[in-house]
Image (cartoon, grey):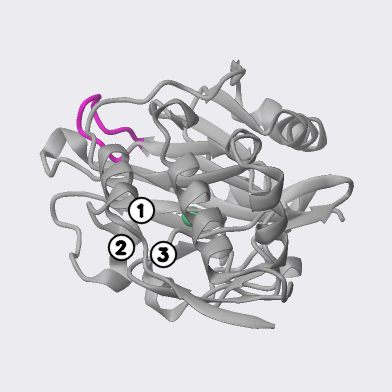
Amino acid sequence: MVHGAFHGNADIDAARSAILDRLGGFPEPRGLTRRTAMVTELLARPHDVAALARRRGALWYQLDRVPECGELRRFAEAIGTPIPEHDPAVRSRVREEVVLEMRNSRESPADVSSEPFSLRSLRLHTEASRRPAADRPDLIVLACVRAPAPGHGLQTLLVSSASVLAGLTDAQLDVLRALTLDDAADTPILRREAGRDVLSFRDFTGDVGWRCADPSVSAEDVTSALIALLLGCYREGHVRGVRWTRAGLLLFDNAQFLHGRTRGSGAEEGDRWLRRIRVICGR
Ligand SMILES: [Fe+2]
């Protein structure tokens, strides 16, 4: 096992902030189909909806109304196992044990532990990347109660893992298959699962330690692979955004997309309120 540390560089900082600090909108994910449906229709055929979302990677519905937290829980229980929100730091924001109320407004707290509820940007990541692979959600479902006005940021970002990986060399992909970041859980950054490459990655703050299972890999190889990965994540054409509207519902596959969020403007019309539920589907 080879160990080392990665320090980032100015190119990565510039690429990241060019994306995350932008208040204007990003284009929607390629192939994202916008459908209209009633909440009752969604609840009547949860398996079809979940299967379509996983096949396409992401799915959008404009619903007739905002789904209640209990309805989101019922939907999630029908398609798999919703992950309980156990973190004591978010307890006051949890409904039905599994629905997280994510409200971001001018009155939001500024401390780091409240980051998801603040106006700060969120760096690209795989959900629950620090958890064991078996505990990571397959699908993330977000329902919009209040949409920020266009141009005020807090836009949910989606980056296709496949598009990022396509820009890496075979040698860099091999490095990622052997590489685990010290802040990560039990899997390397890239692994094969059910015949496909699965990226599990969280953009980090500051330096990050790593360990590499392939002794033939040098520290320079690791640096090169991580720079390519991060620049690919924040490449202009790779980053897609969600245009929230009230009663919009987004489902996306955690193995097919990294996600993040642009910063908020701090203006009242930029306030945002999403309901989130994370689901482990049948494996
Ligand atoms: Fe997340």
Which callout, 3 or 2, points to the residue nearer the camera?
3
Foreground pick, 280 / 92: 280
Give the magenta part as a residue range. Answer: 146-154
User: Count the marks: how many?
Assistant: 3
Q: Position of residue 107 (x, y in %)?
A: 14, 56
Label 1, secondary structure: give it: strand
Which callout, 1 or 2, points to the residue nearer the camera?
1
Is residue 4 at least partly visible in the picture? yes
Compared across the picture, whether 132 is left or right of 13 comes to right
Pointers 3 and 2 in contact (CB under 8 A)?
Answer: no
Q: Where is residue 120 in the image (x, y as percent from the top left)?
A: 24, 54
Residue named by callout 1: 122
Residue named by callout 3: 204
Residue type marked 2: Glu
Q: In this view, does 154 lie above or below 236?
A: below
Which callout, 3 or 1, points to the residue nearer the camera?
3
Pointers 1 and 2 in contact (CB under 8 A)?
Answer: yes
Residue named by callout 2: 115
User: Quick one: quadrant of the C terminus?
Assistant: bottom right
Foreground pick, 148 / 98: 148
Residue shown at the point (25%, 24%) measured from the top left: 150
Earlier residue among tags 3 and 2: 2
Compared across the picture, whether 67 is left or right of 16 comes to right
- Distance in Å between CA atoms under marks 3 and 2: 14 Å
Q: In this view, does 281 lie above or below 21?
A: below
Earlier residue among tags 1 and 2: 2
Taking the magenta stretch, the answer to whether it contains residue 153 is yes
Residue type marked 3: Phe
Residue shown at the point (68%, 33%) measured from the top left: 57
Compared across the picture, whether 145 is left or right of 153 comes to right
